[in-house]
Image: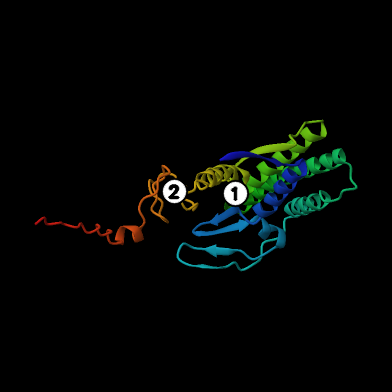
Amino acid sequence: MNSTPVAVKPLHISRSMLGAILLCFFLPFVTVSCGPITATLSGFTFISGGTPTVSDGRQSRPADEPVPRQPLLVISYLLTMAGLGVSFVKQIKQRVLFWLLASVGIISALALLLFQTVMEGQARQNGFALTFNFGFWLTVVLYVALAGFHIWLALGGKFPSSVALPLPAAVGSSAIAAPMAAVMSGAGVAATRTCPSCGNGVNPDAHFCMHCGATLDGSAAPTAQAADAPAPRAAPQTIRFEE
């Protein structure tokens, strides 16, 4: 594989991080259990106020009541969508945009941690167990990374203009075309050898021409017609008898 430089701009990283955060809200955020009954809720369930599915270990069924919307998660989700939309506005100065996206990361990370504190308090008051799943922690980590990355850019951090990525050589690229051209050119040179007798192209390793049968050292071998022709008869000799 060859390393091919690929142009990567800071905003490409920003949009990728924001898009990944929005997808993380659809992952499991919290698992609530009360005795044998458990329910796993995604972040979007808290945002939309949907009805989760509860399980008692034997069967699953919809919960009796929808989950109350959590304003802290709604704020984080809307801020993330707004940050993604603002990243496409070209009129905003780049440093200002970096500070805006850093603010999105800081505020949203704090909102998620405050949401964790609120939920744990409610769990203690109502006597149910609460577990925060990987979707919640991954979202927090991405928000922290979003904030740190854009603070570094806003303070003058230099981002490389291109990144060398190992990419396989595509068919027809110069990495393949050059060796093929060399092979074809070598074949073209070898194919220019001609028979000294008939002038047709011959294999460079051949000892006889496949067209006329001549040897390739310049001397002509007898043709088939000459070989099949009958040998000339010898002239009759006259025998004289003396008396």
Q: Where does the image place residue 93, in percent across and percent down from the top left?
A: 89, 42
Q: Amino acid at mark 2?
A: Asn
- Image point (55%, 63%), residue name: 54
Residue at the (56%, 44%) spot, across then down: 185
- The percent position of residue 33, horizontal first and vertical second, equals 54, 55
* In the displayed structure image, the side of residue 222 where residue 195 appears, left or right: right
Would you say 134 lies left or right of 9 here? left
Disc 1 marks a residue whose amino acid type is: Ala
Task: Give me the residue at 80% from left, 41% from top.
Answer: 103
Of the numbered discs 1 and 2, the one sitting upstream in the chain is: 1
Residue farthest to the front? 243
Residue that appears at 83% across and 39% down: 99
Residue 18 pos. (x, y %): 73, 49
Q: Nearer the viewer, residue 12 or 242?
A: 242
User: Which residue carries the number 2 mark?
Assistant: 203
Tell which tag, 1 or 2, sits nearer the viewer: 2
